[in-house]
Amino acid sequence: MFNNRDLSWLGFNLRVLMEAANTSVPLYERIKFLAIFSSNLDEFFRVRYPYILAISNLGKKTQKQITPAVDEDILSKVQQEINMHLNLFGKILKKEIIPALQENEIVFYYNEPILEAHKAEIRELFLSEILSFIQPIILDGNIAQKFIPENNRLYMLVTLQDSEKLTLTHAVINIPSQKVQRFFVLEPQNNIEYVIFIDDIIRENLSHLFPNMQIIGAYSIKLNRDSELGLDKEYTGDLLQKIEKQLSKRDFGAPSRFLYEGNMPHNVQLFLASAFNLKFDEMFEGARYHNLKDLSSFPQFNKDLEYKKRKPLILHEVLNSGDIFNVLAREDILLHLPYQSYNPVLAFFNQAAVDSSVTDISITLYRVAAESHIVNAMISAAKNGKNVTVFIELKARFDEENNIRWSKLMKQAGVKIVYSKADIKVHSKVALVKKQIDKHQSYYAIISTGNFNETTAQFYTDHLLMTSNAAIINELILLLDYLKENKLDAKAKIKFEKLLVSQFNLYEDFKKLIDAEIAKAANGEEALIRIKINNLEEPYIIKLLYDASNAGVQVHLIIRSICCLKPGIEGLSENIIVKRLVDRYLEHTRIFIFGKDDNAEVLIGSADWMNRNLHSRIEVCVKIDNMRLKKELLDYFRIQWSDTDKMVDLKEDYTQNKIETGNTKKINAQESLYFYLQQTA
């Protein structure tokens, strides 16, 4: 009845890899898709693979109690799938990308001899820019104390022979790609550009590190470690201190994947397994180069090999006004990112920080930019004497350090910081500004599907509602007041109608909306459910969708990543179609549409349909009643659903099929949306 979430996610990552193989995608963008694939897989091994290893050691009955989507021999299937993906990755890179670079007069040294003309330059780079960051360690005696490989760092294992004693020994060298850089551009030869890994610069100069030893072999290695912080049962005490303590240990967590270069001799593999206490299931044969997520920083020489820039669209009502709050007092704004400019959002916070009539600002922050204009606006507002409250989520995975840094800076500036408890995350993306002129109060709010992050807003698709609607404002005030109490386990007597809030009414209201479409179908009316989210995993929601299908409701789903629902099965889900869209921008929008035409209920918000979103977080969705904005969202879904270029159909067996168009011109949804919004701007 359910697909396995990890195999489904691996299917999504395969879809990313398919874009790297797509010759219609500009060459540099194909390289970026390789980097995204590699980065995604690294996170999988840091977060999900330890769970898979653990659950595979349990009995089938116990597994069923943990998850309803148990797949027979899941560990073996995951390993087989990953190996297939990695083989495809290597083929795309070596047989397609590197030759295409050469056609554009760019030579990427990838496991091939170095030109004599470059050897002196490489030696100079090693001695002047790299050597000071290298710490060779001879692996003898008590190895565990001498060398504990850090999480996701690059190393080189070197086998050495003493020229006098003729004894073999091993040494490990750190590859300082994070402190220096991963790629170096060498002097052009005959108008051809050359790029080389820092790894190969080090390989070429090993004799400088071990002058009295014979080098028998050098092999790249990398270790992924379990990166979950393990706070699930730590509900008491100072959460900030607990997370800071756990972060200091993250790079030394339990091993989850050990990557070694494929030509490494078996006896050296056995030595490393013993030295680092590795299990067979944790050791993976890899290629010569690891951490190929670094391909995102591959040197660029030709702008024609990138996507052509799309200038973000600016709404006329915003462009013609110098005051965002005056605009919102007259009408709501719905932004479709990144097609439209993020400037109205920045103006909202920047203006609030200096406007003398603004008295209070509240915002929930999950992931913010490394150099966040929005957080700096909160700091300025506090220094300007305003009451600023920031609900910051310390447990946003891999953004914990950034969020801790900002929380301390804001607190120093006088911002009131509210942390969520260890057992729940505040994942909602909302903000509220209060203005006071004489005795008159006015409020302005933002509810978004994505984070308040001006960096990701340039390449994540999201919707963002800016409003002064009193009904929405009043409910948002209730929610923020509740969060300020930091008593998320209490039973609150708060009723929401315009907002759907997890821990309150979100799950129940989604059930009611699905049931309403089932009732329509039972009465012989046309019934339609259209959903666009990132992940679909929660079993009872899936069962409701199965019930809707069996009742005759047409269900159209656009699921970017995990989909545990099995579509198209007679007697179960024959009226359900699931599609996946991977293109230039990362699909991140969350739209919920129940019904047809103008009478449809339309919502946007932060919640995916996963266990964690529906039951273990604070999520906020909002009903869109404004007919103009509702039409935009209906058109948005319609345009995306009609994509025949980048969209694939998901099948019940995890396969994903490109949509056949025959001789008809393909429709690209992201391109079509830009032109659609251009007409409405």
Image (cartoon, rainbow, N blue to C red):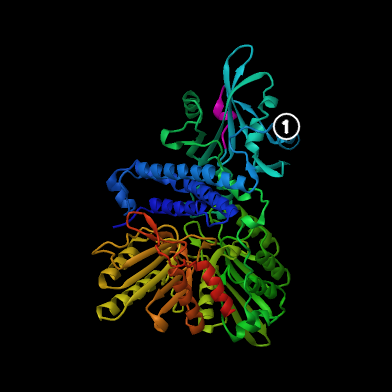
Classify mark 1: residues with Cα within 10 Å, few (<14), some (14-19) or many (20+). some
Most extreme residue toward the top is: 164
Residue 145 percent location from the top left of the image? 57, 29
The local secondary structure at tag 1 comes to helix
Residue occupying image coordinates x 63% and y 60%:
369
Q: Which residues make up the magenta segment?
A: 141-149
Residue occupying image coordinates x 72% and y 74%:
354
The residue closer to the viewer here, 18 or 523, is: 18
Q: In the visual, does 541 lie left or right of 221?
A: left
Taking the magenta stretch, the answer to whether it contains residue 147 is yes
Residue 378 percent location from the top left of the image? 67, 67
Q: Is residue 4 above or below residue 364?
A: above
Q: In the visual, does 445 lie left or right of 538?
A: right
Residue 88 percent location from the top left of the image? 46, 45
Q: In the visual, does 596 lie left or right of 384?
A: left
Q: Is residue 185 above or below residue 587?
A: above
**Amino acid type of the residue that numbered disc 1 sits on in the rendered structure:** Arg
Q: Is residue 131 above or below residue 472?
A: above
Q: Which residue is mark 1?
A: 123
Quadrant of image for the C terminus: bottom right
The residue closer to the viewer here, 41 or 244, is: 41
Taking the magenta stretch, the answer to whether it contains residue 117 is no
